[in-house]
Image (cartoon, rainbow, N blue to C red):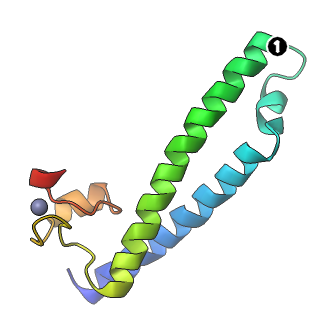
Amino acid sequence: MSTTDVSKVRADLEHSRDELRERLSELTTDGSAAQDFDDGFADSAQVAAEQGENASLAASLREQLEDAETALRRIAEGTYGLCEVCGEPIVEARLEVMPATSRCIKHA
Ligand SMILES: [Zn+2]
């Protein structure tokens, strides 16, 4: 992978990391985002369901955030684009779809 590509990937990852952090902080403040969504209609069961959804959404955002941070660390270390299991280069088509991936197709 060329240096130009890596700096573009890094910019993208930094952007999505910031965005994920922002969405996570919105989700984890007090759930007010969910209440705005359904203002006036929320009963307690609905609120509970929304909080559950928020919790699982937050968990998946947190996972994506970790992936982005790991990928950024790997870019800094110069190991980005190599499979963490076998050390083989990850095909670029895969990195294009999943820029934060740290494993080749065989070890996905
Ligand atoms: Zn591998």
| Disc 1: which residue | 44
Q: Position of residue 96 (x, y in %)?
A: 28, 61
Whether the residue carrying mark 1 lies under 8 Å from ligand 1 is answered with no
Residue at image location 29% in from the left, 60% down from the top: 101
Residue at image location 80% in from the left, 22% down from the top: 38
Looking at the image, residue 61 sits to the left or right of residue 33; the answer is: left
Would you identify the image quadrant in which residue 86 lies?
Answer: bottom left
Q: Position of residue 35 (x, y in %)?
A: 83, 29
Q: Position of residue 76 (x, y in %)?
A: 38, 85
Amino acid identity at mark 1: Ser
Question: Is 104 located above or below residue 84 in the figure?
Answer: above
Question: Is 6 located above or below residue 32 in the figure?
Answer: below
Would you identify the image quadrant in which residue 49 lies?
Answer: top right
Question: Is 58 located above or below residue 78 in the figure?
Answer: above
Would you identify the image quadrant in which residue 36 lies?
Answer: top right
Q: Residue furthest right?
A: 40
